[in-house]
Amino acid sequence: MKYKKISKQVVILGLVSFFTDFASEMLYPITPIFLTVVLGASMSVVGLIEGIAEVTAGFLKGYFGALSDQLGKRSIFIVIGYGISGFVKSLPGLIATVPIVIFSRITDRIGKGIRTAPRDALLASYANGNTGAVFGFHRSMDTLGAVAGPLTAILLLYFFPGKYAWIYLFAIVPSLFAIAFTFTVKDAKSVAKNSEHPFLRNKKKVYKEFWKIAPREYKILLVALTAFSLANSSDVFLILKSKQVSQSDTIAILGYLFYNLIYAIASYPIGILADKLGKKIIFIIGMLIFSVVYFGFAMNENHLIVWLLFALYGIYASSTEGVSKAWVSDLVPDEFRGSAIGLLTMLSSFAVMIGSFVAGILWDQFGAQVPFLISSIISMLIAIVLLSTKTIARR
């Protein structure tokens, strides 16, 4: 497989994401355990927190994606977004209460909402026709941070058992590195050049106007991805199910780390493969793998099978996350990409919010098996529908 040349700005954005996810993923796998074991929160509360966090980020992804198109600037949103997230992550280490965890998680997602769509649009601007490779490379860097983070959390828990607050405090270190790198990010010249399009001048009804000019293929893809997001509840439920099966915090976090390692290794080559074979077929394969994984988590009670499921989950993520954004970037012109990616991520976040909250309620009422089975069935049906839809090109 021939690897593509990656521009300096894409590498810098990759480093920003690496250090940000280093910090975030130190905390992500321990947060549900911290909430349920240390602070006594229920599964419904965990699901609600994740849901609120996702919908907050989702709304802002849409708004700031469109705003970056209108201003013809992306980098300023990257600096602000990563800066906000970096400075709030460690608050629960200072004040260990449920409200502070909620505040920290939601504010962190506010930062993510500000930066995500402008960053992805900027990545596409530097792709030079290889969107799959660029987004795959970025996901690899991002997810390497998601390997380093949980590994660091495990080491800290090994030497300081039960000291969850210390992990929150340590997360400020990689966050500062991420913030420093954001100041070297530069806008692509093409964005500012195209920012005077008539659609971009209507600031009050930007998405109404964008929908009028959006390609039909993009609209169909948007509906399919949003529907799939309803089945794709927060990954915290995978961590909690793993803990339930293994009866071990360490195994649950290691399983999540293993998933991220597979995700990091596979993202770049799968992105290149998506450029060659088409984003549609790779994405559908990813959805089918997701269905198998969730069925496995629903039925499995063997802690050894958990490792296989997390490995497959890494392949699923590699085949969908970056590939979907690359697919959208291929369908939409550069000057509209902030709006296109922002609308997609906004609606997907709303759907994940609903899915996470419902999954938490179903778990509390009927046990873990029911929400996992429902997600497996829904994703399988959507994959079949998407496969039969001829109007979306194999881009």
Image (tube, rainbow, N blue to C red):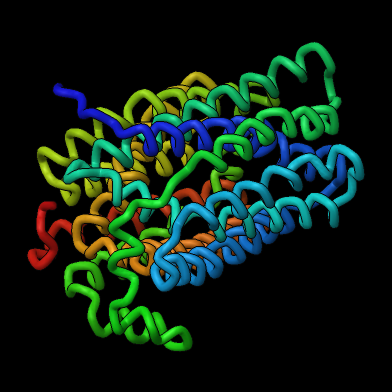
Seen in the picture, residue 243 relative to 2 is either above or below; the reply is: below
Q: Position of residue 215 (x, y in %)?
A: 19, 73
At x 34%, y 37%, the residue is: 318
Q: Nearer the viewer, residue 169 or 119?
A: 119
Q: Nearer the viewer, residue 172 or 391?
A: 172
Q: Nearer the viewer, residue 273 or 164?
A: 273
At x 62%, y 20%, the residue is: 151
Visible residue check, residue 243 = no
Q: In terms of image quadrants, where is residue 336?
A: bottom left
At x 19%, y 48%, the residue is: 279
Seen in the picture, residue 88 relative to 56 is either above or below; the reply is: above
Q: Position of residue 260 (x, y in %)?
A: 48, 29
171 relative to 142 in the view: left or right: right
Q: Position of residue 131 (x, y in %)?
A: 24, 45
Visible residue check, residue 6 = yes
At x 34%, y 51%, the residue is: 188
Seen in the picture, residue 66 relative to 87 is either above or below; the reply is: below
117 relative to 274 in the view: left or right: right
